[in-house]
Image (cartoon, rainbow, N blue to C red):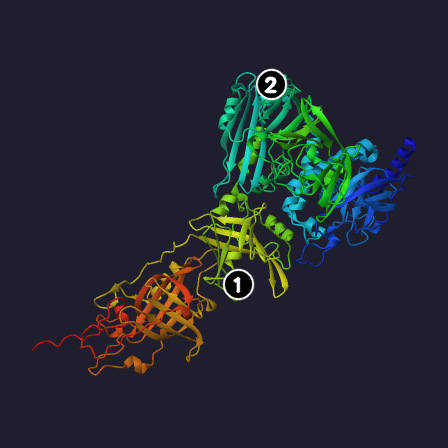
Amino acid sequence: MRTYLMIGLSLFLAGLLSACGGGGDDVGIQPAELPPVKTKFTVTVDLPAGLMTAQQGVSWRPVSQAYAATPELYQDNFAVLFINQQGKVMGQGDITSFAMTDGNYSIEAQVPLLLHGVLVLDLNGVPQFAIGDDLPTNLFMTPLTDTEIALSLKTTLAYRALIKRVATDGHWGIFSETVSDPSNIDVRDAGDFVNELADELSVTLIPKLGLNGVSLSNLMSLSIVNDILEGIMTRKYTELTAQKDEIATIFNSGFWRLASHSSNTGSTLEADMMDYNSPDTATNETRQIDWRWTKNGESDISLTEDFTYLSEQGLVQFDSKDDAIKGQILTSSGWKDLYEYFKVLISSSSTASMTDAGLEEADGRNITMRVNSYSLSGLKMHDFLTTKENHFMTRYVPADTTFGEAAKGYYFTWNPVATRMLLCNTQVGGDECTVAPRDNPTVPYTSLEDMVSVEGAGSIEQVNGYHLTDNVVVELVLNGTHQANYWVNVGGDDWMVVETGIWGAVSSLGKEMFQFAVPDVIKQLANHYPFDTPYLFLVVEQGAVHQGQAILKDTDYHFAGFNHAAKEEIYAVTSRDNLPAFGDCSFGNTSPATEDQFLNSVTECGGDERFVTDSVNSLVDQHLVQISTDPGSLGELETLILKSDNTWEYYLNTVLQPGSSNRSWQLNDNGFLRLTENSNDTFSDYQLWALTHKKYQDRPILAVKYFSQTDIGGANTSVIDNLMTKQYAPDTLVACTASDSGWNGNTLMPATAQTKAAFTSQAASCTVSWEGRTPRFTQSMLAGKALTFSDTSRHLVLNAQADSQSGFQTGRYKDSDGCGFDIPIRWKLEADGTLYYENAMAQSEIDAVFSNGAKRFPTGNFKEWIKVSDTDGLTFTVKGFNHFTRWQSATPALGADDGEMWSDVVALIPAANVPTVTVQTPTEAPLPDSPYPGTILRDGESCDLTPPATPTP
């Protein structure tokens, strides 16, 4: 049968591989006949909630059941396709039976296990494809490399990455033999490659993508998706075709490992150099020098030495290093600390024997290591930085930069000489590897027996088990066979037992523990599987059950490194200058929208800024000011103030809006600032803010991408947009006093008169504009309000009512100091946002005199302009200019265009809140040439209404 099968497959594959040879026309090519072999596949479909195979309308509600749950799928949703060496569809296999059992799909197809056989899925109906065409971008897929397979987004991305490489090369490359002469072992190994690729993409790519409400085709069109898929395949192919090298020579000259991190605690770049028996160390000494750059404001990238490990100096050197202990390893002496700094015990040209810094050779937990190397000359740096360890670094490196001739990469392979049982650091009181009941996640199990159930649960709510990952729960059942049930949250809203396995109670080196192996399909379905191996154990340490992993004897593990030249070339071009320029990023702005579309837009906007715990805490009590640039609301102000009790205040045009006590803010794991409108309402309106860029200055400017969901009159609206906000510390506005006139108390005139033209020029110079945003007054900001000044007795009331003079509105100018005044004014807003007002008294009132001819209103007519210079969202700095007609006849006389230039810090209050002013009016006329009592010219002085005494003859 084996011989017959291979002959049949050879004929079939010959048809597929030769059909597209020579680069000719593919139209009309027919696939060769399949051998009469049927395979039964158990398929678990786990797709992100809301990711669609076809573009459809987006709803604000949680993703509908049709897209979240997989039991609604039918045979017609699936198809089996065959791919040729040009990456094109060259045949279709028959699905001969179809059933759904226990949440999985049982699919029998006329096909053996094949790397170039792929199961595709269309959520909306029959998959659409054409023989001879490329694989459609709107289909989910997974290769038919095993009888138990998961079909997910990451398998789709991984297989598409492989097919894109095949299409580029025009052949199957490192898998040519697997495709032309398949055996189950080789095919399964190729499947492992795809699964490893999928796991890496789940770390390097998928967390950067938003999926809800996004079509798969649109997702596949994103530049970040295509760049990473292409780059990761280039690196994988290069590593797998690398040539054996002499590890002793590489250790002597030293090699580098690079890493990068970004989280709510901050962002770092790391470069660690390790050498052994080098010219700079003692004989047979291992050295590792750690270099770090921690993002700090806008300072550019510069590595500084952080720590040096020397194998001959013992463990005392770690006393000066924070978090030096990374975990524990089980030895015959019990648990010992792991430092993740290795020391070489002995090295030949091809192999090195090593152990951890905290161990001795006698502990029997050594590893052996060998290395392959490859030239990086001409290859893109990005392609070799798209790893779990490095992918945050790529933003600082120009996308098309390539390595020079001297650059080399290393692909290290290591394996333990004895099984290594590893735990995290249980000595620091952390809970990162403790396990707790699913329904009580903050209180760990304290005994292994508490974890065992006598029978399997009927639903997830009844499970006595723990979360292996956020979407996988492990249930241990003592039913004669020691069954392990793996509950998976399929599609985000439907928990089911996807796979079962076996667990056992064992004693290892004196430690009682439970051991089990996580099935491959569960590893594929798990979100961010946290271990390197499927072989896990549970053990009681420090009074709690901890979960660890077993690194099996003689199992190969890998990591990559660079030579000195490659590292120097990378860091020579690594700079924050390569980030997108500061500014508004409108990518992805849309409505309606979803949070996942928002994540895509944030990713595409680039930059290395994000909200972190420290930076958000530093925003508490600061004024985050937005100035609208929309023509319909130009200059309108929105101000946000985060409070230390995690509430927030919202001001519109300086006015506090109701509801502050119910508003709440928090920083989520993605670095998004969530602003909830009503924390008492589960379905409250909310916003998500993502920081994309920051301009560091005395008053920083933040470029923010935001997602907003609001319920307006029962109609839910979701929006992705961008904003800029400027950060002001409270009570720090200072008026711009340049060219101010000052006041002469003797002449009751400006000390230095200025012209209206000089005011216009100086006001423009004082105006603090930022990123195309200019502070100004607006009609809706002023109407119905009153300006208050640093002289708190004075108020300029700006009514919303129209004045009898066209284009103006009514108002009052009031002051309670001295004898007080309450003068009618009319006001308007000029086109540039300057407030203009003038005396609205009747001319007869202005001209009225006492019996001796003295003016009752000695100031004469007046007018004033007030222009905003800056604002912190609650107050304004302003520049003002006024002119009184009496100055034109004073000594010295001022021209009609001359007047007083002044500055102040002002605020707005409701006009109704202005206190009533009682004006005291003199009953007798003052004598000629006496000061004018109770007028606008004697502000702040006491009110003396008694006329001067008549001189004695």
Does residue 171 appear in the picture of this structure?
Answer: no
> Left or right: 355 with respect to 777?
right
In space, the residues marked 2 and 1 are separated at their CA atoms by 69 Å
The residue closer to the viewer here, 688 or 916, is: 916
Q: Residues within 10 Å of mark 1 (few under 14, many from 20)?
A: few
**Element assignment for label 2:** loop
- Looking at the rendered structure, the kind of residue marked 2 is Glu
Identify whether 871 is placed above or below 936. Answer: above
Residue drawn at 27 percent across, 62 percent down: 742
Residue 677's place in the image compared with 250, above or below, is below
Graded by Cα atoms within 10 Å as few (under 14), some (14 to 19) or many (20 or more), the crowding at tag 2 reads: some
Q: Residue at label 1?
A: 630
Give me the disc on residue 360. Answer: 2
Side of 837 relative to 36 (left or right): left
Q: Tell me if residue 655 can be seen.
A: yes
Q: Quadrant of the C terminus?
A: bottom left
Return the disc, 2 or 1, that comes first in the chain's sequence.
2
Left or right: 392 with respect to 942?
right
In the depicted structure, whether residue 669 falls above or below residue 684: above
Q: Is 368 left or right of 184, judged from the image as shown?
A: left
Q: In the image, residue 504 lies at what x, y percent?
A: 74, 29
Q: Position of residue 446 (x, y in %)?
A: 64, 33
Q: How many marks?
A: 2
At horizontal 44% and vertical 57% (from top left) the residue drawn is 769
The label nearer to you, 2 versus 1, is 2
Residue 729, position in %: x, y? Answer: 42, 52
Residue most extreme to the left: 953
Depth check: give the residue in front, 803 or 88. 803
Q: Which mark is residue 586?
A: none
Identified by mark 1, the residue type is Asp
> Residue 392: x and y, percent?
59, 40
